[in-house]
Amino acid sequence: MEAVFALLFPLREYPRAVSLMLLVLRVLFGALLMWHGMTKIVNVESVAENFPNPLGLGHRLSFYLVVFAEVICSAAVIMGAFYRLALVPIIFSMAVALFVVHHGHEFAAKELALIYFVVFLLLFFMSAGAYSLDNIIAKRLNSARLAKVDELPAIKPTNYSSSEG
């Protein structure tokens, strides 16, 4: 369980400038992708029926999964909440758009999916930064873990040098 928490809530200390940069990237690209998803919701009836079905899940289900990634997961990325978990559907949907839906299309058709894919993939390998909910959670988990270590009974050292000979 420790490994899962460490993956989901990495406690990394970055310089203030790096944490600010991560915050700006999260908010900027999260808001842009969220806007992209919101435009799909506004026209749900016309968009859902004609939405690409690259994985054979059906047009509507594919549409709703992409909207989930673009709207709900983007909101989590903006807040830095369950950051890495929220990035997985975004990265997956951008990879499908880039490598499956727009396969064989001219570069201009792939460009936006490529930009989102690269930025969110890079953000995945960083943490959400100091200005995120995940950082608060990571600090609390780390404090709780350290408190458990402090509660463990002390182990008495064994004296291996004895007078017996």
Image (tube, helix red, strand yellow):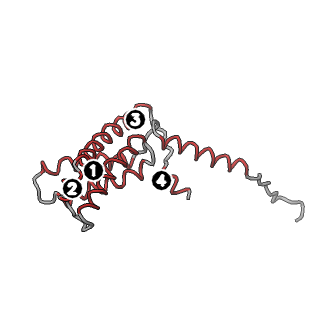
Disc 2 residue type (three-letter):
Leu
Disc 3 to disc 4: CB gap under 8 Å: no
User: Mark 1 = which residue?
Assistant: 117
**Which is nearer the eye, 144 or 149?**
144
> Residue drawn at (27%, 40%), measured in percent from left and top?
32
**What amino acid is labelled 1 in the image?**
Phe
Q: Which residue is mark 2?
A: 98
* Cα distance between the residues tagged 4 and 2: 26 Å
| Image quadrant in which the N terminus is located | bottom right
> Mark 1 and mark 2 in contact (Cβ < 8 Å)?
yes
* Residue corresponding to mark 4: 7
Residue 21 in picture, x, y percent from top left = 36, 34
Between circles 3 and 4, the one closer to the viewer is 4
Who comes first in sequence, dot 3 or dot 2? 3
Label 3 element class: helix
In space, the residues marked 2 and 1 are separated at their CA atoms by 8 Å
Q: Position of residue 162 (x, y in %)?
A: 86, 60
